[in-house]
Image: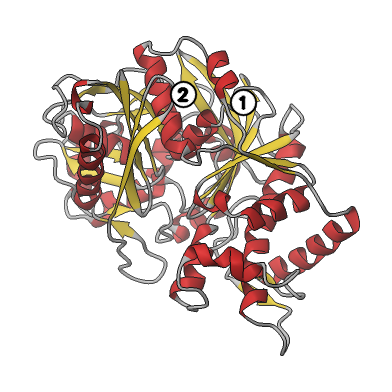
């Protein structure tokens, strides 16, 4: 039996075929356009997302002879807070999707904070009041698309994060569902009960009629209808938000296990076990997953810019021609020569939560060149993760002894060594960096009964390379001091 995993990301969609030995037999990706209507606004065309999923999935299935007849289940993982509202009758989106990076509702969040509501939102949802999350995006769509609020209240419209949108399309409109992890990113799901929260819905003026049903991550989300040549009725059995899927794919099943995914942004999650752990250091409390009715919780810290900073060097500054060149360029110098880069190109995420922050480069001299700036960019990506892990160590009930890493930028050896040096903990990298798609596949395998228990998965996790700290405390203190000074200027 094969599992088809769909990893729908911010800039493209990836399809993977995974066999029962957790081997990836095929992987295909298709990008889609980004839409920037005005500064700080980011949108996607939901149909372009769907087209990219179809393209990647068909190419992946075509790569393995007979694969369509062997797929036993579909798993889905996705960019989480991106928000779509569509017509139930026609299946057409009423507006472009509002992407997680979009800041258009920042003033709404500021007003809610000014009304003293942030502590109650945090207690109920585990989240801070920020434009990052889906709730204020839903409200914006209902308020700014003609007749949308009336139609939503009448039950004519459906909201979903990207998982719900894809399930709607794969099942030909038969399923309007989401999972516990994606629901937790909306600002309107109660962390303790795992259901929608009426108080939060009232504060944001969102009608319940527009919301999907919340299921366990290994539940049955629907069955395929006319999807990429698969037999109709193929079950969708594993759904998680991308960062929770990566935590699962990295076999971080014990309290204290932590992973960091280096993608467009960087996302650190630490397993906290079966009890909700609220952060006092700016992190988010979140379900890691809900399997068979049992919820495992995590603490999460996210930075909005990681790999995107390398893309910025390539596309805007044109210091490099391709993202893969940054390691060789940065390795030409022993350090950044005193240059510090704060990657606040879209504000600062956890633990600072400063949407108004902007990118900063400090310490430039006449001798600062392309290599020093490239090195400072890698340092800045890693220093953001230090802030996150320090906060997690302070809040998590179990000690953190190592960090597992994945995502495209985790292939950069210099970045990973710098990360280990700054954290003073081992950084473990698996041979396969597609932990997000693998996590969705493994949960789907659990749901369909192809895997019996998590201990089997934990034993199967493989180490490709361990990066151990090579610097001393004096060096770390100097790096941290320069970083904190630069952050204050962002």
- On screen, residue 21 versus residue 205, left or right, reads right
**Quarter-wise, where is residue 22 in the image?**
top left
Residue 72, compared with residue 53, is above or below; it is above
Q: Name the spot of residue 198 as percent of width and height, x first.
A: 41, 30
**Quarter-wise, where is residue 177 in the image?**
top left
**Quarter-wise, where is residue 362 in the image?**
bottom right
For the rendered model, the colour scheme is secondary structure
Residue 309, compared with residue 316, is above or below; it is above
Residue indicated by mark 1: 276
- On screen, residue 317 versus residue 12, left or right, reads right
Mark 2 or mark 1: which comes first in sequence? 2
Q: Name the spot of residue 178 as percent of width and height, x first.
A: 34, 29
Camera-nearest residue between 360 and 132: 360
Kindly tell me whether residue 346 is visible in this rendering: no
Q: Name the spot of residue 390 as percent of width and height, x first.
A: 74, 45
Task: Write the residue at 84% across / 54% down.
Answer: 471
- On screen, residue 292 versus residue 169, left or right, reads right
Element carrying mark 2: loop
Sort mark 2 into few (<14), some (14-19) or many (20+) by Cα contacts within 10 Å: many
Sort mark 1 into few (<14), some (14-19) or many (20+) by Cα contacts within 10 Å: some
Camera-nearest residue between 153 and 232: 232
In the picture, the quarter occupied by the C terminus is bottom right
- Number of dots carrying numbers: 2
Task: Write the residue at 72% across / 75% down.
Answer: 339
Residue farthest bottom in this picture: 366
Camera-nearest residue between 413 and 404: 413
Distance from disc 2 to disc 1, alpha carbons, whole Å, reads 11 Å
Q: Name the spot of residue 37 as percent of width and height, x first.
A: 30, 68
Camera-nearest residue between 356 and 410: 410
Residue indicated by mark 2: 194
């Amino acid at each position: 039996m094969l599992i088809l995993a769909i990893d729908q990301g911010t800039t493209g969609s990836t399809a993977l075929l995974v066999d029962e030995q957790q081997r990836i037999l095929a992987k295909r990706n298709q990008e889609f356009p980004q839409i920037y209507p005005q500064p700080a606004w980011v949108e996607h065309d939901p149909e372009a997302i769907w087209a990219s999923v179809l393209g990647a999935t068909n190419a992946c299935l075509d790569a393995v002879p007979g694969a369509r007849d062997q797929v036993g289940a579909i798993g889905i993982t996705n960019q989480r807070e991106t928000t779509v509202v569509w017509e139930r009758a026609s299946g057409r989106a009423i507006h472009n999707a509002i992407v997680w990076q979009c800041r258009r509702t920042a003033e709404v969040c500021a007003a809610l904070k000014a009304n003293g509501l942030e502590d109650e939102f945090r207690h109920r949802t585990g989240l801070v009041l920020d434009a990052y999350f889906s709730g204020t995006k839903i409200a914006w769509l209902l308020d700014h698309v003609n007749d949308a609020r009336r139609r939503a209240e009448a039950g004519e419209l459906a909201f979903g994060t990207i998982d719900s949108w894809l399930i709607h399309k794969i099942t030909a409109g038969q399923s309007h569902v989401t999972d516990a992890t994606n629901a937790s990113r909306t600002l309107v799901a109660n962390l303790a009960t795992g259901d929608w929260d009426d108080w939060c819905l009232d504060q944001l003026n969102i009608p319940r009629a527009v919301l999907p049903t919340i299921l366990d991550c290994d539940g049955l989300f629907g069955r395929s209808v006319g999807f990429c040549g698969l037999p109709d009725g193929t079950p969708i059995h594993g759904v998680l938000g991308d960062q929770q899927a990566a935590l699962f794919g990295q076999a971080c099943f014990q309290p204290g296990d932590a992973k960091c995914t280096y993608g467009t942004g960087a996302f650190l999650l630490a397993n906290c076990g079966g009890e909700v752990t609220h952060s006092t250091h700016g992190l988010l409390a979140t379900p890691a997953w809900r399997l068979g009715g049992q919820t495992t919780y995590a603490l999460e810290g996210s930075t909005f810019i990681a790999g995107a900073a390398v893309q910025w060097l390539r596309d805007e500054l044109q210091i490099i021609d391709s993202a893969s060149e940054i390691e060789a360029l940065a390795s030409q110098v022993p350090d950044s020569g005193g240059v510090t880069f704060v990657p606040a190109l879209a504000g600062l995420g956890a633990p600072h939560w400063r949407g108004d922050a902007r990118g900063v480069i400090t310490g430039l001299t006449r001798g600062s060149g392309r290599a020093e700036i490239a090195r400072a960019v890698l340092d800045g990506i890693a220093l953001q993760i230090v802030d996150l892990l320090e906060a997690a160590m302070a809040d998590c009930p179990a000690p953190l002894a190592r960090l597992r890493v994945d995502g495209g930028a985790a292939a950069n050896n210099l970045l990973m060594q710098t990360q280990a040096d700054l954290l003073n903990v081992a950084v473990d990298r698996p041979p396969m960096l597609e932990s997000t798609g693998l996590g969705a596949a493994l949960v789907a395998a659990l749901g369909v009964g192809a895997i019996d228990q998590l201990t089997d998965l934990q034993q199967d996790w493989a180490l490709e390379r361990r990066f151990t700290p090579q610097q001393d405390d004096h060096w770390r203190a100097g790096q941290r001091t320069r970083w904190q000074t630069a952050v204050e200027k962002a």
